[in-house]
Image (spheres, coloured by chain):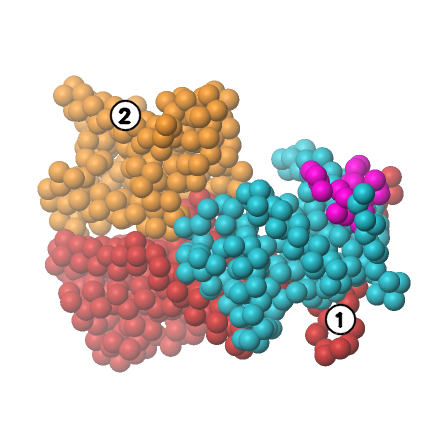
Amino acid sequence: MTRTAAFAREQLRAPFTLALLVAVPVVFVTVSAGVLADFAVALGGSLAADAASTLSAGWAAAFIAGTLGFFQAASSRGADRRLALAGAGSTRVALSRVSASLALAVVAAGAGFAALVLRTDVAHPWHAAAAVLAFAVIYVAVGIVIGSLIASPLEGSLAVAFVFLLDVFSGPGMAEQAAPYSVSRKPADILIAAGLGQGSPGEEWLKLAAVVAAALAVSLAAFAWTARSRA
Amino acid sequence: MNRVVVATRLGFREQARRPLLLLLLVGLPFFFITRAIAQTEQLPRSIGLPGGGEVLTNMRDIHGADMAAITVAFLAGLIGVFVMQSARQADRRLVVAGFRPREALAPRLLVLGAGAVLVVAVSVAVTGTSFAPNLWAPFILGNLLAGLIYAMLGALAGAALGKLGATYVVLFGAMLDLGIVQNPMFGTGEPPAWGAVLPGYGPGRVILDAAFSDHFHAWGALAISIGWTLGLAVAVLVLLERLVGVELDRTPRSRGGDTRTRASRGRTPRPR
Amino acid sequence: MTPAIPSAPPALATVLRLEGVRKSFKTGPPWHRRRLDVLRGASLHVDAGELVGLVGENGSGKTVLMQIIVGLLARDAGTVERPARLGYCPQVPLLWDKLTVDEHFRLFAEAYDLDEGAAAHARTQLLEELSFAKYLDYRVEDLSGGTRQKLNLALALLHEPELLLLDEPYAGFDWETYLRFWQMAEDRRQQGMAILVISHLLAERERLTRVYELRDGRCEVV
C-alpha cells in the first residue's frame, strides 16, 4: 500500500495534475457527447445519441489511463529495478505500479462517468460504470506496454495517441464493422448497449472479464519485466 | 549570432537522431487523415462560410478539409510540450556559460517551428490525395497557423504543468476545439458564438473558407489567427526567458576591464 | 609533512564573496504552507589561487548555495560578488542525450566566446587530462555515468575561468580519475584560478586552503 500510494503521489505532484485528471474527462464528456452520434453516422457507424454519449466517457477514461500507464512505466524503469533489487522484488513492484496506475485511472474514469450520468439518462448505469472502468484497465495496459518499450515521453505519447485513434476509428459504433484489433471492442459494446437501454448477455460479460484479466496480466508482466534483476 | 547558428544546427541534429519520432510525425498524420476521410460517408451537408455565404457539400469533403488542422494541432501541441520540457535544464546551463536567454531559446523555438511545419506539410500533402481545397495558399496558411498556435500552447502548457497535465490539455484541447467546436460536421454547420474565443476559431474559419469558397473572405479570421500567433509568441518568449534566465545580470565582457558582477538585490529579511 | 599551501598574494584579491545570503522555500500543500529556511546568512569568500571546500550534511543547502552563486536560484537577501566568467560543474550532469561529446564542446565553446583555435587546444588538453578522448564521437546517451561526469567537468573547465564552482564533481569517477581530478585542481589553483568544491565528504583536506562547513544555514570555517 505504501508503494502504491507513493507511486500514485509521484504522478500527482506536478501542478494541477489531479485537477486535470478530473476536469478533462468531465469537459470532454460534456462537450462531445452531443455530437458523437452525428460523427458516428458520418463515419458509417450507427450510433444513437444516447449510446454516443456513453461512449465518450469510455474514450475519455481510455486516453487518460493510457497516458498515465505510459508515464508510470517510462519514467520509472531505473528506479523500479533498484527498488526490486533492494528487496521489494519485481513482482511486488509491478503490483504496486499497476495498482497506482489503476487508482488514478479510476479517478479519471469516475469523473467522466459522473459527467455522463449528470448529462444523460443512462438506463443501466452500473453496466456503463463497469465498461468505463474496463476501458481504463485496458488502456493502462496499452500505456504500460508502450512505456516499457519507449522511454521518450514525446514518442511514447504519440504512440499512445496512435493506438487510441486507431481504436476509436475502428471500434463499434464508429466503423461499419468493428475491427478485430480494436482493443476496446468489448467494453464499447457493453457501453453502447447500456446507452441504448439494453442489458448485455452473460456471454458478453465473460468476454469482457477475460479481456480485462488479460490486460491486467499484460500490465503486470510488462512492469515485472522492466523491474527484473539481470543476474 | 554565431552562437545561435551553432545551437540551432545542433538542435536540429538532436531531433533528427530520433527516428521513432520522425516515423510517428509522418506516419500518424498519414494514417489518421487517410483513414478518417476514407471512412466518412458522402452525406450531404450545408455549411456556413465566412463572409455570410453557404455551400452545399458533403461530410467526406468537410472531413477532408478539417482533418489536417486537427492532426496538426495535437501533434504540434505535443511537440511543444516535450521539446520545451526536455531542453529547459540543459539550456539553463548554456545561459550560465554565457548564452543570453534569447540566444538559448531561439534555437529551441526554431526547432519547434520546424516541427510544426513538418507536420503541416505531411498533413496537407496527405489531405491532398483525398481532397483538393479551392484555394491552396490560404488552406496551407490556415493549417500552418493552427500548428504554430498549438505548438506554442503546448510549450506554455509544458512549462506550467507537468508532463501528464500538459499532454491532457494539449490533446483534449485540440480535439475539442478543432475536432468538435469548430467542426462544421456538427451542429448547425457553423461554430457556436462562444467558439470564437478558442484558439482554433481563426485557423478553422480560414481553412473552411479556403476549402469551399471561390474567393477568400475570411480576412477577419486570418487577423484573429495572426493575433493569436503573435500574442502566444510574446507569451512564450517572456515566460521561457524567465525560466531559462539566471538571476545575476552579467557585466558585458570588456577587454581587460573589470568583469566583476555585484548583485545585492534581495528582500529585507523578515523580522523574527 | 604537507607543505603549506601558499595563499594568493594580497594584490589578487577576492574572486568570490558572499555576505549574509538567505534563502527559504515554501513547502507543503496550499492550505498548509510551511517555510523552510535553508540559508540563514551564509558568508564565505574565495581568493585567486585558493582551493576551498564547502562541506555539510545531506540537505544542509550546499547545492542551493551553489545555485545562488551561479544564478540559477534567486536569493532572498544578501550579496554575491563573483566574476562574470566562471565555470560551473553541476551535481547532475546537465547534458543533451542525443548530442556527442564533440558537439557539447562546440556548443560550450560558443557560449564561452572561444575562438576555434583556443577551443580546440582546450578540448584536446581536457580529453587527455581526463582520458576520454576515445568517446569524442559518442552520444551522451551511450556514455557511462563516470564518462558523463568527465564531460560535465571538462565543459566547466573549457575556458579556464577565474572562478571554478564544482558540485560533487567526482561522483562516478574511478580511483585513477579521482586522483587525476585533484591534480588538475591543484595545477589550476597554482595558475591563479579560484576553486570552490562542494562535497558532503572531503577526504583530501590537506589539499585545501580552507574548508567551510554549512551548518544551520551558515558557513563556518572548520
Find chain C in the image and tell me its colour.
cyan
Quarter of the rendering occupied by the N terminus of chain C = top right
Quarter location, residue B140: bottom left
Residue annotated with mark 2: A217
Q: Is residue C8 on the magenta stretch?
A: no
Label 2 chain ID = A
Label 1 chain ID = B
Instruction: Answer whether labels 1 and 2 touch (C-beta < 8 Å).
Output: no
- Element assignment for label 2: helix
> Which amino acid is tagged 1?
Thr
- Element assignment for label 1: loop
Q: Is residue C211 on the magenta stretch?
A: yes
| Residue A94 percent across, percent down from the top left | 38, 26
In the visual, does B262 lie left or right of B193?
right
| Residue C124 percent across, percent down from the top left | 53, 65
- Alpha carbons under labels 1 and 2: distance apart: 63 Å
| Residue C125 percent across, percent down from the top left | 57, 64
> Which amino acid is tagged 2?
Ala
x 71%, y 35%: residue? C57
Which residues, given as a range, are shown in magenta? C201-222
Query: What chain is colored red?
Result: B
Is residue A42 visible to the viewer in this orientation of the structure?
yes
Which one is in front, C211 or C63?
A: C211
Residue annotated with mark 1: B259
x 24%, y 77%: residue? B135
| Residue C107 percent across, percent down from the top left | 52, 66
Which one is in front, C214 or B186?
A: C214
In this view, C94 is above or below A103: below
x 70%, y 74%: residue? B253
Quarter location, residue A90: top left
